[in-house]
């Protein structure tokens, strides 16, 4: 089962500032992030697209259509270097627990729309292995008295989440609601992988919903029983039933 290390403690902003490159970290990160998203969308429009594999067409009852295309990769998503977010040299002297706390705080320092969590490096390697084999999945996000189906695309070190209906309508030209980037710089030395989540559309997702999506997506790849559903969706789609995902999450079948 996945073991996300997500800390709720918040340090004084002065301690965060010591590991953030400069006082305008928040505004710079936000500005660069949205310019990155724009670049991503331009590349998606020009990148080669592939038709939906025939084995996915059976799932049309849940919103897919024959003209849907998938992105072939996320190379244009050029994330910010870790050194521009964190003082890596000072972080090297911290314990894994301290570093996880600091990372959470640095992302919190950017306020709304930014999430900082971390995970064990061994689990990350399993996640990397399984997502390379199964790049897509669907996750129901509970809202009010019902759920919205989210479409997940993965090419590590990135995860992209968007609404299934929006993706159905716009395909690769649709901007993701939420992205997650994985940083492996401390995987060997501290057995820790840092994860930065960015909510692109705060009007569509709260930070709590985005964090839940990230944790839930990871659980479907890291839990052996849940991963069978991911494999079925990607490899045996004719046998895939969305109600099995709802049952796994203990959500009612509407």
Image: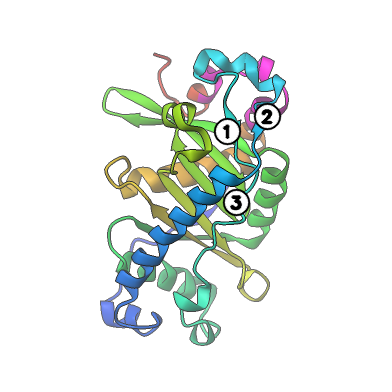
Seen in the image, is 221 located left or right of residue 214? right
Quadrant (top left, top right, bottom left, bottom right) of the N terminus:
top right
Mark 2 vs mark 3, CA separation in Å = 19 Å
User: Is 229 in the magenta?
Assistant: yes
As drawn, the residue found furthest toward the front would be: 46
Seen in the image, is 97 located left or right of residue 22? right
For label 1, the SS is strand
Work out whether residue 218 can be spotted. no
For label 3, the SS is loop
Q: Is residue 101 above or below residue 174?
A: below
* Precedes in sequence: disc 1 or disc 2: 1
Q: Position of residue 188 (x, y in %)?
A: 68, 72
For label 2, the SS is helix
Q: Is residue 62 above or below residue 16?
A: above
* Precedes in sequence: disc 1 or disc 3: 3
Mark 1 vs mark 3, CA separation in Å = 16 Å
Q: Is residue 22 above or below residue 183?
A: below
- The dot on residue 137 is 1
- Magenta span of residues: 228-245
Binning the other alpha carbons within 10 Å of mark 2 as few (below 14), some (14 to 19) or many (20 upward) gives some
Q: Which residue carries the number 3 mark?
A: 74
Marks 1 and 3 close (CB-CB < 8 Å): no
Binning the other alpha carbons within 10 Å of mark 1 as few (below 14), some (14 to 19) or many (20 upward) gives many
Marks 1 and 2 close (CB-CB < 8 Å): yes
Q: Which residue carries the number 2 mark?
A: 234
User: Is 79 in the magenta?
Assistant: no
């Amino acid at each position: 089962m996945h073991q996300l290390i997500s800390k709720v403690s918040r340090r004084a902003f002065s301690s965060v500032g010591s590991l953030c490159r400069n006082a305008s970290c928040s505004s710079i990160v936000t500005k660069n992030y949205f310019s990155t998203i724009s670049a991503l969308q331009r590349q998606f429009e020009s990148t080669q697209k592939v038709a939906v594999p025939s084995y996915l067409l059976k799932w049309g009852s849940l919103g897919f259509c024959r003209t849907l295309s998938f992105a072939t990769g996320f190379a244009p998503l050029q994330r910010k270097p870790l050194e521009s977010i964190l003082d890596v040299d000072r972080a090297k002297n911290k314990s894994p627990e301290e570093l996880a706390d600091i990372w959470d705080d640095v992302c919190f320092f950017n306020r709304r729309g930014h999430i900082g969590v971390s995970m064990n490096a061994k689990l990350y390697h399993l996640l990397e292995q399984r997502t390379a084999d199964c790049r897509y999945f669907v996750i129901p996000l509970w809202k009010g008295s019902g759920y919205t189906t989210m479409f997940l695309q993965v090419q590590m070190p990135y995860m992209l989440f968007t609404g299934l209906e929006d993706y159905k309508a716009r395909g690769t030209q649709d901007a993701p609601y939420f992205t997650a980037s994985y940083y492996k710089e401390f995987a060997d030395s501290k057995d820790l992988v840092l994860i930065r989540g960015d909510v692109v559309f705060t009007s569509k997702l709260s930070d709590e919903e985005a964090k839940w999506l990230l944790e839930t997506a990871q659980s479907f790849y890291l839990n052996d029983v849940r991963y069978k559903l991911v494999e079925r969706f990607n490899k045996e789609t004719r046998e895939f039933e969305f109600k099995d995902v709802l049952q796994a999450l203990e959500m009612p079948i509407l």
